[in-house]
């Protein structure tokens, strides 16, 4: 299911949406996970990996998940967001892409490296 990188995650709880950047998105046997660009910071955030359990429902450009705790997650390509929060997310994802390129890796190579590092977290 797309998108698998450069996505925006809208986390909706009690009618309010919190937008999160997703450098990489992984489907899992029981839902999905995403990795925020914060893992690339000089002092990586322990909060960069998010895992959600729930049934994925495909949409035109992404998917949605309703978790057991009632939160709804909408996953879509960051490029499709309007300006404002959308531009902020695109900016941080562009920063992450530059950081990865500076380490002589492509986004595909980095996504695979991260997937292998996460291993059991995605099982």
Image (spheres, rainbow, N blue to C red):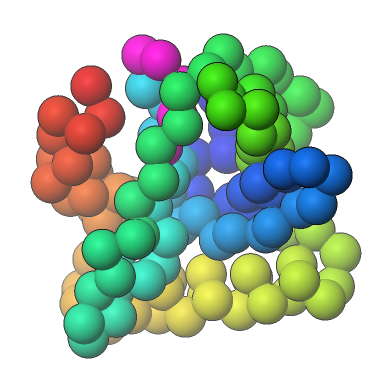
Residue at x 34% of width, y 51% of height: 49
One can see residue 65 in this view: no
Q: Is residue 111 above or below residue 67?
A: below
**Residue 72 in the image, given as x and y percentages of width and height:** 69, 33
**Residue 55 in the image, given as x and y percentages of width and height:** 56, 13
Q: Name the quadrant of the N terminus.
A: top right
Could you tell me what secondary structure mostly forms the magenta stretch?
strand
Residue at x 57% of width, y 28% of height: 69
Q: Is residue 9 above or below residue 21?
A: above
One can see residue 94 in this view: yes
Q: Is residue 44 above or below residue 10?
A: below
Q: Is residue 116 left or right of residue 56?
A: left
Which of 95/28 is in front? 28
Q: Is residue 26 left or right of residue 102?
A: right
Which of 64/110 is in front? 64
Q: Name the quadrant of the C terminus.
A: top left
Q: Which image quadrant is residue 79 in?
A: bottom right
Residue at x 29% of width, y 80% of height: 41
Stretch of the chain drawn in magenta: 29-33
Q: Which image quadrant is residue 21 in?
A: bottom right
Residue 52 lies in the magenta stretch: no
**Residue 70 in the image, given as x and y percentages of width and height:** 65, 27
């Amino acid at each position: 299911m797309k998108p698998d990188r450069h996505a925006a995650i809208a986390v909706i709880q009690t009618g309010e949406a919190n937008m999160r950047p997703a450098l990489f998105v992984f489907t899992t046997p029981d839902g999905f996970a995403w990795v925020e660009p914060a893992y690339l910071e000089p002092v990586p955030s322990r909060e960069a990996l998010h895992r959600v359990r729930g049934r994925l429902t495909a949409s035109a450009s992404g998917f949605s998940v309703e978790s057991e705790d009632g939160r709804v997650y909408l996953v879509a390509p960051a490029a499709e967001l309007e300006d404002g929060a959308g531009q902020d997310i695109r900016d941080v994802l562009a920063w992450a892409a530059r950081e990865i390129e500076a380490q002589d890796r492509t986004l595909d190579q980095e996504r695979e490296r991260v997937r292998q590092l996460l291993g059991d977290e995605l099982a």
